Image: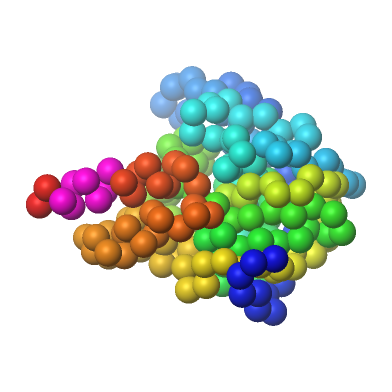
């Protein structure tokens, strides 16, 4: 594996899949989403674009090769449960992988992990929290708070297909973009550091970064050039 690998390892605490369903908000608005993920016992095949049994409702913003797997960190759940006063189960953030030991300050854009014995995945971008999180938990402020504290979760592309299951190890086997942890990326996307054209361009140009984030950062740079 090209790049620097350090002794970073995590664990797949819980595995979830889901299909689109129709729901109604407290104000009576009807909406459809696959954010309602349910835990899976046993092993599940991880393909190039998703886990078997997992379907995205809006393929414009979710799913595809750069977003085959959505991850959220088990370490964040206790504080969210206290802040939101909801007994949030794993999968509450619409994540497929609930990970342990791999928070946004530890994981870098482009990190490559072996999951269990066979599958290999790569971190493509931090997650961009969407309105479906607000609708599911009726907390309009939730996406903004996730952006502000950097606890967004992240997406994976699949380099090698294989079966995965809760309890699998997540072993770092490649780190091509050392220093580009996901908190740094989130600060550039959502915080004041986004006004730094050099940093923004450097993030956009990382080869492992998702095509979507490259486009968004390109638009940010175009606006910065006009100021």
> Which quadrant of the figure has residue 27?
top left
Tell me what residue is drawn at x 61 percent, y 70 percent. 3
> In the displayed structure, does residue 205 sit left or right of residue 193?
right
x and y percent of residue 17 in the render? Answer: 72, 38
Residue 208 visible? The answer is: yes
Q: Furthest-left residue in view?
A: 227
Tell me what residue is drawn at x 50 percent, y 47 percent. 210
x and y percent of residue 132 in the render? Answer: 48, 36
Tell me what residue is drawn at x 64 percent, y 55 percent. 122
User: Please, what is the dominant secondary structure of the magenta stretch?
Assistant: helix
x and y percent of residue 49 in the render? Answer: 67, 36
Judge by depth and name the residue closer to the eye, 132 or 173.
173
Q: As displayed, is residue 41 above or below residue 182?
A: above
- Is residue 41 magenta-colored? no
x and y percent of residue 54 in the render? Answer: 71, 33
Tell me what residue is drawn at x 35 percent, y 55 percent. 189
Q: As displayed, is residue 194 above or below residue 54?
A: below
Judge by depth and name the residue closer to the eye, 215 or 12.
215
If the image is split into quadrants, where does the N terminus sit? bottom right
Residue 80 visible? The answer is: no
Q: Furthest-front residue in view?
A: 2
Q: In the image, which residues are magenta?
A: 219-225
> Which quadrant of the figure has residue 112?
bottom right
Q: As displayed, is residue 99 above or below residue 211?
A: below
């Amino acid at each position: 594996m090209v790049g620097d690998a350090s002794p970073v390892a995590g664990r797949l605490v819980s595995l979830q899949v889901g299909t689109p369903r129709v729901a109604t908000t407290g104000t009576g608005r009807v909406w459809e989403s696959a954010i309602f993920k349910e835990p899976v016992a046993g092993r599940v095949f991880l393909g190039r674009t998703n886990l078997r049994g997992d379907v995205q409702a809006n393929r414009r913003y979710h799913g595809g090769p750069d977003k085959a797997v959505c991850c959220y960190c088990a370490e964040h759940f206790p504080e969210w449960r206290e802040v939101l006063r909801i007994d949030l189960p794993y999968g509450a953030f619409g994540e497929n992988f609930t990970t342990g030991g791999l928070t946004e300050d530890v994981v870098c854009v482009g990190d490559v992990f072996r999951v269990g014995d066979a599958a290999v995945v790569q971190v493509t971008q931090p997650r961009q929290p969407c309105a479906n999180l607000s609708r599911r938990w009726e907390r309009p402020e939730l996406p903004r708070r996730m952006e502000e504290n950097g606890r967004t979760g992240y997406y994976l592309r699949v380099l090698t297909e294989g079966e995965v299951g809760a309890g699998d190890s997540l072993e770092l086997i490649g780190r091509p973009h050392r220093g580009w942890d996901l908190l740094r990326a989130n600060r550039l996307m959502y915080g004041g550091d986004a006004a730094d054209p050099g940093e923004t361009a450097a993030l956009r140009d990382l080869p492992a970064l998702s095509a979507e984030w490259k486009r968004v950062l390109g638009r940010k740079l175009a606006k910065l050039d006009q100021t």
